[in-house]
Amino acid sequence: MKVSSIKSGLSALFFAALLAGCSSNPVVEEPTTSTDIEDTSVQTGQVDSSEIEDVAVETVAADTIFYFDFDKALLKPESRAALLEHSAMLQSNPRNVRLEGHADERGTREYNMALGERRAQAVKEFLVLQGVSPSLIEVISYGEERAAAYGSNEDAWGLNRRVELK
Amino acid sequence: MGQKIFALLFLLLFSSASYSELVIRVTQGNDKPTRIAIAPIDQTGIQTGEDISRIVESDLQRSGLFETIERRNMLAFPGRAQDVYYRDWRMLGSEYLVAGQLRSVGGGRYQLEFSLLNVTAQKTVLTHKVSGSINQMRDLAHLVSDKVYEEITGIRGAFSTRLAYVTAIRKNDKYTYRLNVADADGAREKLVLESAEPIMSPSWSGNGKELAYVSFETGRPAIFRQNLVTAARQQLTNFTGLNGAPSWSPDGTQMALVLSKDGNPEIYLLDLQSNKFSRLTRHFAIDTEPTWMPDGKSLLFTSDRGGTPQIYKLNIATKRTERLTFTGNYNARPSLAPDGRTLAMVHRQKDTFHIASFDLKTGRMIELTQTRLDESPTVAPNGAMLMYATKQGDRGVLAAVSLDAGVRYVLPSSVGDVREPAWSPFLR
């Protein structure tokens, strides 16, 4: 139901845009209901060139994964540059972000939940100190429940002790 | 924002998974096991689909305290005590014999009358009648095991208990988490909850009728309770941050749990009647994994307030805490034996994590397992064995070890990662 109404709204709008491109034609005001047009105007907005530039800034952006030592929640020096970039971006272009904290498989599951949260909190504190509004940041821990790398070895563990900015 | 809700509920009563994920293999037994013969049950004309004697045999074998006489060496299959020729069993070196017969008593009910005989003393030790429906033959068998085990060892049998555990299956970067309940021997696995988001930390209610657990189905961790008979389910917490490590009080009226809503993980009590939360710990360190002392007056928990994770005891009335473990730099996830004195926990030795027992009176610590990544110890309600999660290759499996480390067995899985076992209380 909803999909089809959006679709019909889209095609109506597309048709309207086509007509508008040809010449100023009174038929333009025609299409369906106003709510449908509101829905689809979000979609057409993405075709706007300024929006495309926004996307490009994000793809150039710094790392979104920050790694930690075993049973530690101290930020590593190598995370600093990327976190500064994120804090600058979040201040100039505020958006809601989610910091997902993770642990490696060693140790107990609930303790690792706490550890993952502590790591994500460390990242949050850094961003807030740089001036990012704390209300933009949600912290969630997955403990050892969502491994990024598989295998019981140092390499995999190192990749799993992380905070992901999303 | 991960609002995908994929929770599927199944009535425990009606869902019965056709596959059994757990297969028992005893890897080490007792030095001087008691030799016992379980004669095939006389069940003339009744198709039960189960071999009751075999179930009793494997129960007793799994305890590590018994060695069973092979069926093919038996000279007779007596169904009643009066049909037993003791000489036949003495020749086989059997110290005890179990004989029984199953009869229909009408109304879809079946009665199993069985006897335990002392072959050496040539006398009947006990005779019991137990009955159930055709679908309860495994229950009847475990009851026989419980009676026989208790009579010979003096320890209450725990074969009629159950296990809750979590399995995780990863396929093309999609996960399926399942919370299951099975008999203590791994048979009759039943699905309690399935979700695409993590499920953690199952905890039994004192009466064995409910489970509490952590589910991420809302996109964040939250604690739920679920009735195993009706599948009725209730979300208990929905706070910012951690909502974890639920542990039901022995009398069932309260739940200890972990919330980090005030900034970092603290232990709370939830009164299940009034739904009021009260905070028990106040420390900037990690406080987690609460578990109850049998008297319900104190909790044991894990904290890294001393710099490394260690086990602490908390008096609920006075809020006084006391550090219990000092050996090693990682002691966590306490699980108390029913004697209130023997504590099982995860203990780090160099770079390996295994299960150790710790005597609260003497302070003596014994390493019970030798594998590398052992966790989630849970002690059987009779205190004889504990179950834990370990790795076989890259797969998580459940294993068991006796609290004196003399007996051990593995329950290899055929599907996914098996983890977080929780042994039920006595169910009858």
Image: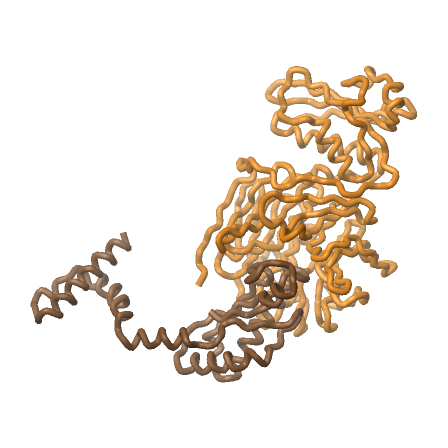
The picture quadrant where one finds residue A152 is: bottom right
Instruction: Pinpoint residue A120: horizontal percent, then vertical percent.
Output: 56, 71
Residue drawn at x 53%, y 83% as measured from the top left: A129
The picture quadrant where one finds residue A47 is: bottom left
Rendered colour, chain B: orange
Residue drawn at x 53%, y 52% as measured from the top left: B170
As drawn, the residue found furthest toward the right would be B121
Residue drawn at x 90%, y 22% as measured from the top left: B122
Task: Judge by depth and name the residue closer to the eye, B141 or A66.
Answer: A66
Instruction: Pinpoint residue B257: horizontal percent, then vertical percent.
Output: 63, 60
Whether residue B295 is visible here, answered yes or no, is no
Instruction: Pinpoint residue B190: horizontal percent, then vertical percent.
Output: 58, 40
Task: Judge by depth and name the residue closer to the eye, B205 or A135.
Answer: A135
Residue drawn at x 54%, y 47% as measured from the top left: B193
Q: Which chain does the brown colour mark?
A: A
Instruction: Pinpoint residue B43: horizontal percent, then vertical percent.
Output: 69, 19
Q: Is residue A139 above or below residue B105?
A: below
